[in-house]
Every structure is written in C-alpha cells, then in structure tokens.
Image (cartoon, grey):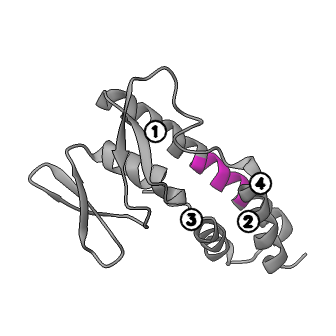
Amino acid sequence: MTEKEFTAGWIRKLSSGVLKSFPEDFLDSADTKVIKLPSIELILGEELFGNYDLLDTKHNSVLMVDDYYSAKYIIYANRTKPGDIRIPVINEQTTKMVKAYEKHLDETLRVIEKEFNKNFPGSKNHLSTINDIFNHVNIKRL
C-alpha cells in the first residue's frame, strides 16, 4: 500500500459513515432553534467585543454570535454547507455537543495516525496525510 492509497482509503471510510454527522448524531433532547446559513464555506473570524464573527472565504462577515462554542458549532455544522442548521437554545448544551464532537474527531485522528504509523514506520508524512484526508472530506478541527 502506498501513502496515496492509504489516503484514498481513509477518505472513503470517512465519507461512508465512519465519521459521525454533526450536529445530527450529537443532538439529544435539546431544545433548538433554526439558523439560516448561506450554503457557503464559513471560517471563524476574530473575537470583537465578546462576539465572534463568521466569515466567508473572502473574509466578508456573514454572521455574528456571542459565544465561542456557538461559533464552533456553526462552523462544524456547516461542513456540508446546508441552508440552515438547528442549534441548541441553551449555550451549555451547545458547548457539550461541540466538546463531544471534538472528542470524536480527536479519536478518529488518533486511529488514522496509529494506522499510518503501522503501515509506514519511520515516515514523516503523517501530518500532511491526515491534513489531506481531513481537507478532502471538509473536516475542520478548531
């Protein structure tokens, strides 16, 4: 197996359901509200007077939120560029969901890294390979 084949294999695995869907797989009985999104890639901007700016890729402001975990939640939920998302009304529930998703991402990353090191001992390309895999399936870890 080559590193390119390894990358392609993990892209297939993550695309076929190994990766949990956020927020759907993390929503429990939380009361939610719907936020409309522009169905474009969003990035986290700077914190400004306690608010967090969500930007498009040209750095135009799209949305402002007043909680860091709400900003992360929206970025993670926007992975597939939906037109709207459901977000918990209570910030503590949003924080809990984001932390659970990040734990899932970190565990997935460890599994990929462990398998890479097993298949390619001594290779220094594990970070770039993982970045390629995550970028291809549009996974961000903030």
Q: Is residue 41 above or below residue 17?
A: below
Residue 98 % position (x, y): 44, 40
Which element carries disc 3, helix, strand or loop? loop
Q: Are marks 1 and 3 in contact (CB under 8 Å)?
A: no
Q: Quadrant of the C terminus?
A: bottom left
Q: Is residue 121 visible?
A: no
Q: Nearer the viewer, mark 4 or mark 2?
A: 4
Q: Is residue 34 above or below residue 65?
A: above
- How would you rate the neighbour count of disc 1 (Cα within 10 Å): few for under 14, some for 14-19, many for 20 or more? some
Which element carries disc 4, helix, strand or loop? helix
Residue range corresponding to the magenta coloring: 105-112
How far apart in space, not on screen, are marks 3 and 2 (Cα)? 10 Å
Give the prevailing secondary structure in the magenta stretch.
Answer: helix
Specify the quadrant of the image occupied by residue 40. bottom left
Residue type beneath disc 4: Ser
How far apart in space, not on screen, are marks 1 and 3 (Cα)? 19 Å
Residue type beneath disc 2: Ile
Q: Are marks 3 and 2 in contact (CB under 8 Å)?
A: no
- Disc 2: which residue: 11
- Disc 1: which residue: 99
Please state if 51 lies on the left or on the right of 13 as rendered: left
- Disc 4: which residue: 16
Residue 69 % position (x, y): 33, 43
Mark 2 and mark 1 lie on one chain; the one further toward the N terminus is 2
Mark on residue 138?
3
